[in-house]
Amino acid sequence: MEFLSVSGAAASDVSIIVVLAAFSVLCIIGLIVLLCRFVGRDGKVKNTALILAGVLVAGFALRLVFALCVRGSRADYGVFITMVNSLKLSGPAGYFTGDASNVLYPIVYFVYLIFGGLANAMELSSHDLGMQFMIKLPLIIADLLTAFAVYKIADRYINRATALVLAGFVCVCPIFFIGSAIWCNPIAFTVMFACFACYYLARKKYAATIAFATLAAFSSKEGIYLFPAIAVFSVYHFIRAIINIKRDKPRGGALLGADYSAVISVPVSFVLSFVAVYLLGLIMVHSHSYNPFTYIYEFLLAPLGGWVYFTSDGLSVYAIFNRSGATAGARFPSWLFVCLFAAIIFGVVGVVYFTKRNRATMVLLTAFSLLTMQVYYPGTTAISMQGTLAVILAAYALNRDKRILYVLFAVGLCFVVNSLITLGNMGQLNNLSDYDLAAQTAGGIKAVTIACSVITVIAHLYFTVVTVSVGMTGQRRLLDNKRTFGESLGEFFAVKKDK
């Protein structure tokens, strides 16, 4: 095999990286042109259901090709295989032993009780292509549901034609399917739950928002990053409902009105959502502990301070300073860092949201919180950025500020290049027999990660300005209708006054 660098990226791997990066650029250009055509119109579409079904089928087919041709990260794929083998040998008992870093999270585990059970019933071995299909199929389905969630948001808050365009973008652009079809990581579930949480947050449906945020938190360690925005939104409206009740003194069924319902729905939803997830989680944790506080700690809190590296080939500020693959010293105050970081995130979200108290702004703040965690919080990986990108797109669907798309495109392209080059460096952009190379990137490959991290950090700083601008002043830079290719690109990059 011809190697293009001492790090191990083969010519075939480079071809895949270049093709998918170029395809991402084409998808972005296509999105810009279509948005300029539809975003400012009534957006009426005939045969919507048929078109949406076609878009989802195209997304499924594209993912399936890569899912069967590339096994992906052997370490993450191995987590699924370990779960399926454990289910075959001893059932649910004994799978979880207290280390959440090397197991499927409870919601994902519950899904794979079905698909893993089917794989075992068909007597598929770990290396069978059928097993690879059974492992990646739920991730692909989660991806398509993410596209549907983005469609629902855009259909409600922009128009139907734009909704179909954005759903199609999620379905076909590599920015959104690397985690499921290529890398093979449970973060696809977190992305899907996060997008539905944003949809219901925008509709001011407290119960559904909290339920989907809880599902996201118990799908992967990145799911807890949603908590600051969801907590600020829910607690504010809970307190506001109490104030409204004291002022208006409603009686009986009037308590269920829009101005008062949060006083009931917020606490009840938090309790019921956790109880439901806890009961599902008992399937995998009962042999370790029945203690719900242990359950919360080991899946939600311990991972925040239990990271191994400052970043593991992730797009972060630490990669810029050559800390990728570096462990913290014994005296590094990880939990103090967690508390300070949480205080900063809560503070920014609270200040910006309370300025306008706009639900579209809160979804934008959710995207901002997720990107902030990915860029500055230790413990990120090359694939963890996937959890942020669809939420940024959802924020655009609600706010329609084209500057949000600047951030999405810059970070998304960096994510595509960095995640694929990480897999290529380890020789895992293929379907060869399983093995695990834990070595960090080096040489020219590391230079690419550093360059992508620089762009990502700059994009985050720009996103901070955009978030404050939209959230505190309400001014936006919207796309105007254009028909031709050149006019659309000119409109997208034109510097215009805020509206």
Image (cartoon, rainbow, N blue to C red):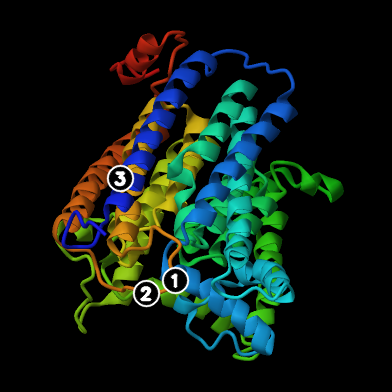
Q: CA distance from mark 3 to mark 2?
A: 24 Å
Please, what is the three-letter code of the amino acid marked with disc 3? Cys
Please, what is the three-letter code of the amino acid marked with disc 1? Ser
- At label 3, counting other C-alpha atoms closer than 10 Å, the crowd grade (few under 14, some 14-19, many 20 or more) is many
Which residue does the image show at 42% across and 8% down from the upper left? 484
Which residue does the image show at 57% across and 57% down from the upper left? 189
Q: Which residue is mark 2?
A: 436
* Mark in the foreground, 2 or 1: 1
Which residue does the image show at 46% across and 26% down from the upper left? 31
What element does badge 2 sit on?
loop
Q: CA distance from mark 3 to mark 1?
A: 29 Å
What element does badge 3 sit on?
helix
Please, what is the three-letter code of the amino acid marked with disc 2? Asp
Q: Earlier in the sequence, mark 3 or mark 1?
A: 3
Q: Is residue 170 left or right of residue 144?
A: left
Q: Which residue is mark 1?
A: 433
Q: Would residue 357 be visible to someone looking at this image?
A: no
- At label 1, counting other C-alpha atoms closer than 10 Å, the crowd grade (few under 14, some 14-19, many 20 or more) is few
Image quadrant assignment for residue 22? top left
Q: CA distance from mark 2 to mark 1?
A: 10 Å
- At label 2, counting other C-alpha atoms closer than 10 Å, the crowd grade (few under 14, some 14-19, many 20 or more) is few
Q: Position of residue 490 (x, y in %)?
A: 32, 13
Q: Earlier in the sequence, mark 3 or mark 2?
A: 3
Mark 3–mark 2 CB contact (< 8 Å): no
Disc on res. 414: 3
Image quarter of the N terminus: bottom left
Q: Position of residue 277 (x, y in %)?
A: 66, 70
Give the answer, above or below, for where 262 lies relative to 324.
above
